[in-house]
Image (cartoon, rainbow, N blue to C red):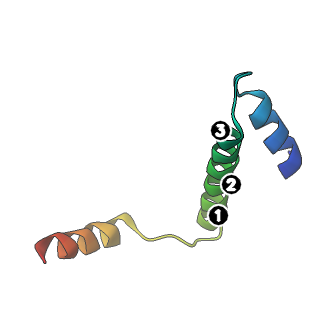
Amino acid sequence: MKIKEIAIESIKALPNDVTWEDIKERIDFIAGVRKGLMELDEGRYIEHEDIKRELKEWISK
């Protein structure tokens, strides 16, 4: 599905009393998810164990 088609279908799924802000939030959310999935496909991610180690360091400070 093309980006424009995804946007249109997403807007259609919103209730009839939708606001411009609701539409913007939905589009931003979908764009963020798609970007994240693309980064995962490209191998651009941080391993779970690395995140746990970093979090432990942050909390102990």
Q: Amino acid at mark 3?
A: Asp
**Which residue type does callout 1 highlight?**
Asp
> Quadrant of the image for the C terminus?
bottom left
Tell me where residue 41 appears, x and y as whole percent: 64, 63
Query: Alpha carbon of mark 3 to alpha carbon of mark 1: how far?
Result: 29 Å
Dot 1 corresponds to which residue? 41
Q: Crowdedness of circle 1 by 10 Å Cα count: few (<14), some, many (20+)?
A: few
Amino acid tagged 2: Ala
Which residue position holds label 3?
22
Q: How many marks?
A: 3
Are the residues at dot 3 and dot 2 in contact (C-beta closer than 8 Å)? no
Image coords of residue 11 (percent x, y): 77, 35
As measured in the structure, the alpha-carbon distance from the residue carrying label 3 to the one carrying label 2 is: 14 Å
Question: Would residue 2 be visible to someone looking at this image?
Answer: no
Q: Nearer the viewer, residue 14 or 5?
A: 14
The picture quadrant where one finds residue 46 is bottom left
Tell me where residue 59 appears, x and y as whole percent. Answer: 16, 69
